[in-house]
Amino acid sequence: MTSDTGTGTDTTGRGASGPVTEELDAVVLGAGVAGLYQLHQLRQQGLRVKAFDAAGDVGGTWWWNRYPGARFDSEGYIYQYLFDEELYKDWSWSQKFPAQPEIEQWLHYVADRLDLRRDIRFGTRITAAHYDEERGRWTVHTDRGDVVDTQFFVSCAGMLSAPLKNIEGTDSFAGELVFSSSYPAAGLDLAGKRVGVVGVGATGIQIIQTIAPEVGHLTVFARGPQYVLPMKNPTYTPEDQDRYKSRFEELRATIPHTFTGFEYDFEHAWADCTPQQRLDILEDIYQDGSLKLWLAGFGEIFFTEEVSEAVSEFVRGKMRDRLRDPHLIDTLVPTDYGFGTHRVPLENGYLEVYHRENVDLLNVRDNPIAQIRPEGVELSDGTVVELDVIILATGFDAGTGALTRIDVRGRDGRSLADDWGRDIRTTMGLAKHGYPNLLTTAVPLAPSAALCNMTTCLQQQTEWISGAIRDLAAEGKTVIEPTAEGEDAWVDHHEELVNATLVPKTTSWYLGSNVPGKPRRLLSYIGGVGTYRQKCDEEAANGYPTFTRR
């Protein structure tokens, strides 16, 4: 999860020529969780490497997303680097699910501990990266006029770092309008004001439940209902911190090999349980107050309609019991897709917010938002909701958006935006045919595009990239690129897994459905984090058979 390197990219540097200002072995795009570790590893190899980030400091998504209520829904003690025991144990989380300020402080701690800032260019947006086939090198341009000649271009730009800004009239609003992904660090004065929040995904939920008691009046514009699970977030005592730190070796041995990169995994088979046992298991896991019901309940929810419907109805029942009002239930409780077939947010009192007298819920599925006007939000039927503040939690162009908003050109001048605009294809989410020495994290067809505890997968991907670069140099070679046949084989494998599940039946950002014209494909590898790691390890151990190296 790294920086918003894609937001607001202009045409500066596109196709431009100019004197090279710096020669490097590797350029790393982004200084978040992946970028920091990638920079550290490549520097440890003795390479000349710099990271570039549009943000003002380290943190990636945790620098940009400062909206009220932003926090982990992965447990803090597993959302950490596991390559260094002292680095792990010398940081203590105050809660099970820490909030954004503490997460940002942790990433500052990592950057300072590893002395990374000296090789990071902050406030610098990469605008173009062009591959020179004759020289086997990339020319990278920035909005500050840098022209960097580099052997490797490594993207650590994050899977949710290209915000969607597709509502008309945002510039016309007379009040304050902000996107959740660029919420002001100093916050907004919302006391007593008429506030509108657009979007009830994971971000919208965190914002809504946090600001409702503060604002004068809150209007929520809800389109796609979400299954939600209640979060239990205890404060940690020193004894709690010592307890999880004592499990370091256990966590390091377990987390990278589970299905989703969390510490827990699927333990129960639906067919082996009686109806009462199933209900008892669901109730027990539900009370855990984590994502365990999604990621360690019954794995059959992804494959079997009967199981999906039973678990979905269990969660719907929990939500209906809390909502009570028919309008709220109709707007907020999903009925047309299965629980877990896309992102499941954790919440803390979110559903109860809608019982407050100062909160209105508007269902915009059938009466969509038409535009933003100076006085507020206009709906398709002509209704105008007058507001003082509008907060847009409208999602991202996930997986591909960060790189397609940059002018990335590979062999023969081919455009990555054009290629992914026709069909989203990669080799293991680590590289793209036609783009030699472009190595990637958190792009499509790897678990890190959605179905993974991000630090687990980003560590694994950056370690694979570092190993591939090291192995290439050891053999006296300078260029690595996936073969067309290897890419085809990975895409076929990916699609075979996807088509065996219920996930493609759900319309969501998991399939790029929130971006008009985006090719439909499940962005994330669904074969499991442990299986993916094994396949990546086999690729390297066998001499990179689906890559050309020269």
Image (cartoon, grey):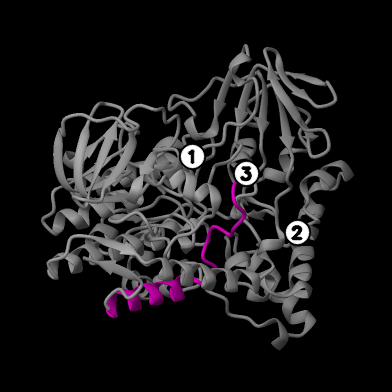
Depth order, front residue of 386/214: 386
Which label's residue is closer to the chain start, 3 or 2?
A: 2
Horizontal arrangement in the rendering, residue 420 relative to residue 256 (left or right): right
**How would you rate the neighbour count of disc 3 (Cα within 10 Å): few for under 14, some for 14-19, many for 20 or more?**
few
Q: What x and y, as percent, mark residue 283? A: 70, 69
Instruction: Give the distance between the C-alpha atoms of the residues marked 3 and 2, in whole angstroms.
Output: 22 Å
Depth order, front residue of 483/94: 483
Q: Check disc 1 and report the residue beneath it.
A: 162
Q: Check disc 2 and report the residue beneath it.
A: 337
Q: Do the residues under discs 2 and 1 have CB atoms within 8 angstroms?
A: no
Residue 2 location, quadrant = top left
Q: Which mark is residue 477?
A: none
Q: Do the residues under discs 1 and 3 have CB atoms within 8 angstroms?
A: no
Q: Check disc 3 and report the residue beneath it.
A: 517
Look at label 1 and name its amino acid.
Ala
Horizontal arrangement in the rendering, residue 263 relative to residue 25 (left or right): right
Horizontal arrangement in the rendering, residue 434 relative to residue 470 (left or right): right
Relative vertical location of residue 129 with respect to residue 287 in this rendering, above or below = above
> Depth-wise, is mark 1 or mark 3 nearer the camera?
3
For the C terminus, the quadrant is bottom left
**How would you rate the neighbour count of disc 2 (Cα within 10 Å): few for under 14, some for 14-19, many for 20 or more?**
some
Look at label 3 and name its amino acid.
Gly
> Depth-wise, is mark 3 or mark 2 nearer the camera?
3
Look at label 2 and name its amino acid.
Tyr
Residue 439 location, quadrant = bottom left
Which residue sits at x=57%, y=31%?
165
Instruction: Give the distance between the C-alpha atoms of the residues marked 1 and 3, in whole angstroms.
Output: 16 Å
Do we see residue 160 in this rendering? no
Q: Residue furthest bottom?
A: 272
Q: Check residue 476 for magenta coloring.
A: no
Q: Which residues are magenta?
A: 517-542
